Image (cartoon, grey):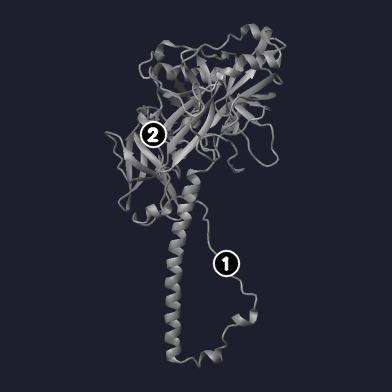
Amino acid sequence: MSETNPFDSKDIKEDGVAAGTDAADAADNGSAPEVPPQTQVASQWYGVSYYNHDSSAVMPLERKDAKRITRRSRVAFVALLVAVAVLFAALAGLGGYVIADYLAAQEENNPNTEQNPPSIILPSTGGGSSDQTTVFEASDAATYNYAAVTLTPKEGTALVGSPNGSAGEDATTRIAAVAAARNSVVEISTTTVSNRGQLVAGAGSGVIIHADGIIVTNHHVIDGASNIYVRLTNGNTYEAYLRGTDEAGDIAVLKITPQETLTVAKLGCSSALLYGEDVFAIGNPLGSLGGTVTEGIISALEREVTMDDGTVMTLLQTSAAINSGNSGGGLFNMAGELIGIVNAKYSATGVEGLGFAIPVDTAVISINELLDHGYIRGIPSLNVTLVDRAFNWYYSYPYVYAVGEGSPLQEGDWILEIDGTAVSSVSALKRAVRMCAVGDTVTLTVYRKNRTESVEVTLTEYVPNRSDVNFN
């Protein structure tokens, strides 16, 4: 991950599944419109530079020599220049295509989040012979009464003034606390079909929060997944049903149909945490080291962190080692209680011990909303599916990939501005939309059919399409 966007987090999409594109997609859509300077992105030049070390071979013609060139020589010289220009243009076009194709492939397989480890992760063998993979189906997930489940974090009033912070009188040894919590943390693996038709694997962690097989993880761990699998510490692997996600809060709720009695994480009270309080994280770093325990302390209680998509979150900061694959796992206190959902780390050369987690008091609000309704209510939406797409070599804008019923936008629109503010990405547009409320009307400047137009859009409530999870 680059140092300019250092937080391992999520890849936000607005109102649908985003698809990567390259500049060649915009070739038949006219020239770029006039836009404010801040929408221009830095150019990247690719090519080969030639340097001739023999200066005598490149001396320019003197004027008297130039006069002696015959007409035939001039014609031949011009023809040569034309041939070279044509050849260079062809090579440049081919090179641009190859580069764009390569960059698109790199973007789709970029392992900068827990969703994209370097190799395909298949469901683990469990509950049977060593040469056969057993995956238990989520048979009751679609009809389960989620609204009957309500989670309540631990009451923190009695913990005020406790020298043990959030653990209170229940504080014990680290070994005992880990033993109480370890089996409540699961490994999560996903498979996703990319827009190039490739099968992309992902990995992360999750925490069991209800005995019926309800699991909490991060939105960015399962975002866009075609299949989601959960592996318990006993090796049993389950197909998971996606109940719902809170994209802004980076929370997702899954459901499996357990064949055994599950270990459920005890909920702690994150508001009772103290600076310096001992904590430990359990997760699946690198997507292959499930059950890994790392220790640390609470380094900050309300750290405002700007994620790489521009979302600002208020998180717990910990010195416990956090790595790719830990996202969605648990941060626990010395009573073995869940006090945070790990979701980010700061990654840069020379930086260590900067991990972050969603406070459990905050996470429970999203979890209960998702259990009750399947989505977060009141989120405004443009009612379209958007992707980031290059307009030409210099500009990139949100591109309308699909349109919902009743929307005045059209498929193929490029959105340049919202209420006079330039936007150059889906993330920027989404942030602007979420500053509004359902029912508000916004004015979009769009590029449509080779001209710029103003379109007024009334924002609707975002209700996600949960049909993207395929059950085999």
Mark 2 is on which residue type?
Asp
- Examine the image and state in which quarter residue 296 appears: top right
Tell me the residue that label 1 is attached to.
49
The N terminus is located in which quarter?
A: top right
Task: Using the numbered discs, state the Cα–Cα distance from disc 2 to disc 1 in whole angstroms.
Answer: 44 Å
- Examine the image and state in which quarter residue 72 appears: bottom left
Residue at the image position 47 percent from the left and 30 percent from the top: 222
Going from the N terminus, do you reach mark 2 or mark 1 first?
A: 2
Residue 108 x/y as whole percent: 47, 44
The front one of 242 and 286 is 286
Residue 140 x/y as whole percent: 38, 17
Rate crowding at label 2 as few (under 14), some (14 to 19) or many (20 or more) other CA atoms within 10 Å: many
Secondary structure category for the residue under label 1: loop
The C terminus is located in which quarter?
A: top left
Residue 118 x/y as whole percent: 54, 41
Residue at the image position 60 percent from the left and 31 percent from the top: 285
Secondary structure category for the residue under label 2: loop
Check residue 15 in the rendering and tell me which mark sits there, or answer none.
2
Left or right: where 247 falls relative to 174:
left
